[in-house]
């Protein structure tokens, strides 16, 4: 994770999650809960059990540094536990030519083609960091953060019409508006020390001067403490769980993330990169 001059990263971040499922039929599951490649890990553990018996897990690495964990779960009560202690940082992520193309395109939840008129009406004279700051601030003031207010099928257009949502809705609207102004933008699922209520969190990375810069229109957690899990076009690429076949119903989920010795202070006027 890289910071602007004068910023102070959290020295150690401890993250964990526990997910319980009721597996009704043999299910092929894909998990995205592990810390992405980049920072140094002092410790890490991921286990899956069904009715107390261990289930084999296969790890797959994604080109952008993400790590997927696959398992085949028989019917029963499934429990996944994950924990990691992050002690290191990594260099800022650079924007490659393919990313310049892919992350400008409209996607499932970030309909930048539909929101083009709004983006140009509100931000036509702005570029670079000024545009990034303006879009983030505008979304933060236009929406109300209301837990449970959006459906998993809602995209950026519906979020703007409803004027409310949760972190992924804020992120999708920021992404769509930036892409409409030809700025590559993508969604990052993160562990977020300081977040209240605690959960998996979604923020945006935008391409500014060849580097990916973090934006969080909710301002609910300091960007310097965030720990990357998964990166993609929108929430369809970054879900913590995908049921590829069979049936598994979510019973409960608990997420925790802390930073020590203290949470950093986030100066929203500064550019911050994360990995």
Image (cartoon, helix red, strand yellow):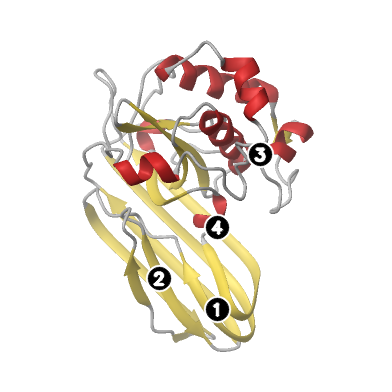
Q: Nearer the viewer, residue 14 or 104?
A: 104
The residue carrying pointer 3 sits among few (fewer than 14), some (14 to 19) or many (20 or more) residues within 10 Å by Cα, namely many
Q: Which of marks 2 and 1 is in front?
A: 2
Q: Is mark 4 on a helix, strand or loop?
A: strand
Q: Is residue 263 visible?
A: no
Residue 226 percent coordinates (x, y):
39, 40
Residue 35 percent coordinates (x, y):
35, 55
Q: Is mark 2 on a helix, strand or loop?
A: strand
Q: Which of marks 3 and 4 is in front?
A: 3
Residue 212 percent coordinates (x, y):
35, 34
Q: Are marks 2 and 4 in contact (CB under 8 Å)?
A: no
Disc 4 marks which residue?
254
Disc 2 marks which residue?
69
The quadrant of the image that shows the N terminus is top left
Q: Earlier in the sequence, mark 3 or mark 1?
A: 1
Residue at 47%, 38% in the rendered image: 104
Q: Do the residues labelled 2 and 1 touch (CB within 8 Å)?
A: no
The residue carrying pointer 4 sits among few (fewer than 14), some (14 to 19) or many (20 or more) residues within 10 Å by Cα, namely few
Of the numbered discs in the image, which one, if any, rests on residue 221? none
Q: Which of marks 2 and 1 is nearer the N terminus?
A: 2
Q: Is mark 1 on a helix, strand or loop?
A: strand
Q: In which quarter of the image is residue 76?
A: bottom right
Of the numbered discs in the image, which one, if any, rests on residue 156? 3
Of the numbered discs in the image, which one, if any, rests on residue 78? 1
């Amino acid at each position: 994770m890289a910071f602007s001059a004068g910023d102070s990263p959290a020295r150690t971040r401890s993250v964990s999650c526990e997910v319980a499922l009721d597996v009704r039929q043999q299910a092929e599951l894909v998990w995205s809960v592990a810390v992405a490649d980049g920072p140094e890990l002092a410790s890490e553990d991921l286990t899956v059990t069904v009715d107390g018996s261990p289930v084999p897990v296969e790890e797959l690495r994604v080109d952008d540094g993400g790590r997927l964990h696959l398992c085949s779960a028989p019917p029963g009560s499934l429990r996944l536990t994950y924990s990691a202690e992050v002690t290191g940082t990594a260099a800022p992520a650079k924007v490659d030519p393919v990313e310049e193309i892919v992350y400008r395109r409209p996607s499932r939840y970030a309909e930048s083609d539909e929101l083009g008129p709004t983006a140009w009406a509100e931000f036509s004279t702005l570029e670079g960091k000024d545009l990034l700051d303006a879009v983030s601030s505008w979304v933060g003031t236009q929406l109300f953060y209301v837990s449970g207010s959006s459906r998993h099928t809602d995209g950026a257009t519906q979020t703007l019409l409803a004027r409310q949502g949760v972190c992924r809705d804020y992120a999708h609207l920021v992404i769509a508006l930036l892409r409409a102004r030809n700025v590559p933008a993508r969604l990052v699922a993160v562990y977020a020390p300081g977040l209240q209520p605690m959960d998996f969190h979604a923020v945006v990375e935008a391409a500014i001067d060849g580097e990916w810069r973090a934006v969080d229109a909710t301002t609910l957690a300091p960007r310097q403490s965030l720990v990357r899990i998964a990166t993609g076009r929108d929430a369809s690429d970054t879900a913590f769980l995908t049921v590829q076949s069979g049936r598994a119903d979510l019973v409960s989920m608990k997420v925790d993330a802390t930073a020590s010795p203290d949470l950093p202070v986030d100066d929203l006027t500064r550019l911050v990169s994360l990995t």
